[in-house]
């Protein structure tokens, strides 16, 4: 199907899911990057790519993916929280604090945001 139409969303996502389930993480990352070159507005694909990068301990690439997610979904406090925790893990404490404050601003009852 992808040979006939390389922009087929369902076939691309199915291939990525198969690669991920087979444990071929690097191939899944490669396919997902190719998919996002065409479908850059798919925030769920960016989230999945960040998870794959995190599984490989590639923190700066995962941070980039989460930045893209935040650009696409700026009002969702959960994505800001993930980004803040990732920045804290990477040692960027100033940026982590800023994002934790954004979490508290967007969701005033978020305990993890307050702990950050």
Image: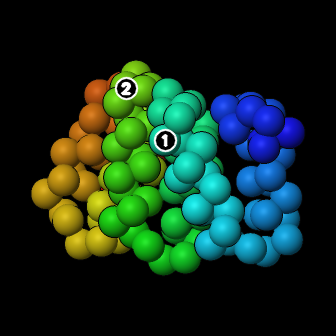
Of 20 and 55, nearer the camera is: 20
- Tell me the distance, in whole angstroms, between the alpha carbons under discs 1 and 2: 21 Å
Rendered-image quadrant of the C terminus: bottom left
Q: Secondary structure at mark 1?
A: helix
10 Å crowding of disc 2: few (<14), some (14-19), many (20+): some
The picture quadrant where one finds residue 92 is bottom left
* Image marks 1 and 2: residues in contact by CB distance under 8 Å: no
Secondary structure state at the residue bearing disc 2: loop
Residue 81 shown left or right of residue 32 in the figure: left
What residue do we see at 43% from left, 49% from top?
65
Question: On the picture, is 106 further left or further right than 110?
Answer: left
Q: Is residue 105 above or below residue 101?
A: above
In which quadrant of the rendered view does residue 105 lie?
A: top left
Check residue 74 in the rendering and tell me which mark sits there, or answer none: 2
Image location (x, y in percent) of residue 88: 30, 65
The residue depicted at 19 percent of the width and 45 percent of the height is 98
Which residue has dot 1 on it? Answer: 37
Task: Please say whether residue 108 is visible from this viewpoint.
Answer: no
For the point 53% across and 52% down, which residue is it?
Answer: 33
Relative to 57, is 102 above or below?
above
- Specify the quadrant of the image occupied by residue 12: top right
Near mark 1 (Cα within 10 A), the count class, few <14, some 14-19 or many ≥20, is few
Q: Is residue 89 above or below residue 108?
A: below
Can I make out residue 92 in this image?
yes
| Residue ranking furthest to the front | 4
Q: Quadrant of the N terminus?
A: top right
Q: Nearer the viewer, residue 73 or 89?
A: 73
95 sits to left or right of 50: left
Residue 24 position within the rendered picture, expressed as x and y whole percent measured from the top left: 74, 74
Q: In front: 111, or 42?
A: 42
Residue 94 in picture, x, y percent from top left: 13, 57
């Amino acid at each position: 199907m992808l040979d006939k139409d390389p922009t087929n969303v369902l076939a691309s996502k199915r291939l990525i899911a198969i690669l991920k389930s087979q444990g071929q993480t690097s191939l899944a990352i490669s396919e997902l990057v190719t998919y996002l070159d065409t479908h850059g507005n798919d925030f769920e694909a960016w989230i999945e790519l960040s998870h794959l990068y995190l599984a490989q301990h590639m923190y700066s690439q995962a941070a980039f993916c989460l930045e893209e997610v935040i650009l696409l979904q700026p009002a969702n406090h959960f994505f800001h929280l993930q980004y803040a925790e990732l920045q804290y893990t990477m040692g960027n404490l100033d940026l982590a604090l800023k994002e934790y404050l954004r979490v508290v601003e967007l969701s005033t009852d978020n305990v993890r945001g307050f702990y950050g």
